Amino acid sequence: MPPPEPPFEDSRRLTGPNLYFVHPGAVLETLGPNARDADAHAAWAERVRAMCAELDWPAPEIVVRRHATGASLAFSAPIDRLYAATEIDEWAWCAAVDTGEADGRFHAPGHPAVWDPASAAQTLRRFADAEAKPDAIALLRAADARGLPTLFDDDALSIGLGARGRTWPIDALPSPDDVPWPSLGRIPTALVTGSNGKTTTVRLIAAMLRAHALRTAHSCTDGLFVGGAGETLERLESGDYSGPAGARQILRREDVEAAVLETARGGMLRRGLALCEADVAVVTNVAADHFGEYGIHTVEHVAAVKLTVARAVAERGWLVLNADDTLLRERAMWTGSIDDARIAWFHLDAPRDDDTRADEREELLRLASEAGTPMCGLRDGRLWIRAAGTATDTAIDAVINLGDVAAMPLSLGGRARYNLSNLAGAALAAHLMGVPAQTIRATLARFGADHHDNPGRLQRWRLGGVEVLLDYAHNPDGLSGLLGIAQTLRGAHRMALLLGQAGNREDADIRALAATAMAFRPERVVLKDIDGYLRGRAPGEVAAILRDELHRHGLSDEAITVRLNEVDAVRDALAWARTGDALVLPVHGYDARDAVAALLDRLQAEHWHPGDPLPEI
């Protein structure tokens, strides 16, 4: 008879600041009949404390985060013994819910014995001793005593960042006396997170830093990039590098003078943050997305995850928040600060139509203005920035005009309000990182005019009278913003939409995307899969859920087609189009997006018109 399934999943190391605490540690997600039992959680915590004491570890910080389907059980641990920490986490939880039968349930041989704490301690001590890296700890302590940033993982240890950093293989570390301490230091760094707009904001800040003559690297969901002023941007890697591994890779490059790091939900929940002290951390917004993973079930949970970046803001750094986001305002207004970070605000000229607490927004902006808080906002069609300063700084009341937003390419003539937020947030972040106002202004005036500036994010083509928008819109909020722009472009003509979703979303989230689409009454919907993002679902399974929801909202079979390949889906929409129509193309696969952009560029160059044959791929 096979052994019972273990009562947990997703047992993992936390290698940096995370949702639960600022220190490294371990966390698991509970399963089974005791998953939400408070007595079992208390028994787990008692065993963790006892085992840490038995192993002579520092007293752990313990967090039990209960949620709708179970609990996340986390505790802090020495950074060089995190694998052993996951074993302690699993052992303590299994022991807490064990029936007392000494039958080796839940654990295979070689793991700590659930039924015998003394034997378990011996096993766990062997694990911890084998994993310990005293040479690395000595270097980390020496760097901390000098106030220097560090990066540590299974393969390497770094002291300092970028051009002011050095990296050594973990099996060839120097002694503290052999480290060139005077040459090591920091470089300007920014973290960017949020539900929508992360990649655009990252690219904008990076462009401003490059224009400020800093050789800047950035990481995002499209890859790793580096370049300087006047240089062609070099792609180092392709793919999703919005987690800590991508951040460490560019922070370790000795040719990098500044870094901007896209910081996605998944990386923060799986491993925490790579960087412990950033100059600026931007949260663009919070929206319902990714429910069901790692115990995240509500938009309030999403907000808590996004605000993990506050734990990685340097002592004199800034947390840059969107004042138009109700949840971000609420957390800041009730607490006065978030993890002691200094807060700066960006905003548009008016609250969102669905903001039921707009009065609180106005009060927040008034108080922030009176306090001399740095802010960037939209007023009278122009973007303004209130300079950072101190109470004794005569520049504290300086208000700088950054230009007419309708003339900024990313705004699409002022239509793209969500990009106006991205422009404001990026401008404020760059200002707080020391970029001069004239450099910020010049970047805003040109960025987005070239399709290579912001690939895959609100790119626009006009092909023989057909308006085409290529974007990443991947959740209801993002799709609503994109379709709102398309409505202004199509006038009385028709609209076609590509619709797909990653397979790791819950069925309800997939249906919500279809419901959002139907609020804009498209005349045609082309359903697709996302290459590389099926994540456990069968091909066409997501499309079937979307189709059912579209039917429920009244869209006929004749108006729906299925082209699971994203490039084929785009070609279907183009073949359907007539002059005056609008095509809305959320394309998510990296290779597919490049192929679609190349196709649209070719059609534009060849003066294609609706009804003309499409070139073969």
Image (cartoon, rainbow, N blue to C red):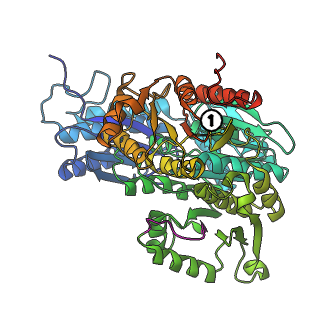
Type of amino acid at the residue the image marks with label 1: Asp
Q: Which residue is mark 1?
A: 222
Instruction: Examine the residues drawn in magenta and state their main secondary structure.
Output: loop
Who's the residue at 56% across and 71% down the image? 350
Residue 570 appears in which quarter of the rendering?
top right
**Residue ranking furthest to the right:** 230
| 600 inside magenta stretch | no
Q: Is residue 294 visible?
A: no
Query: At x 38% / y 38%, what residue is drawn?
Result: 505
Q: In this image, 547 relative to 107: left or right?
A: right
Q: From the viewer's perspective, is 224 left or right of 506? A: right
Q: Quadrant of residue 180?
A: top right
- Specify the quadrant of the image occupied by residue 116: top left
Residue closest to the eye, 373 or 121: 373
| Residue depicted at x 83% and y 62% | 438
Image point (56%, 81%), residue name? 367
Viewer-side residue, 63 vs 234: 234
How many marks the image carries: the answer is 1
For disc 1, the neighbor class at 10 Å (few under 14, some 14 to 19, many from 20) is: some
The boundaries of the magenta stretch are 344-355
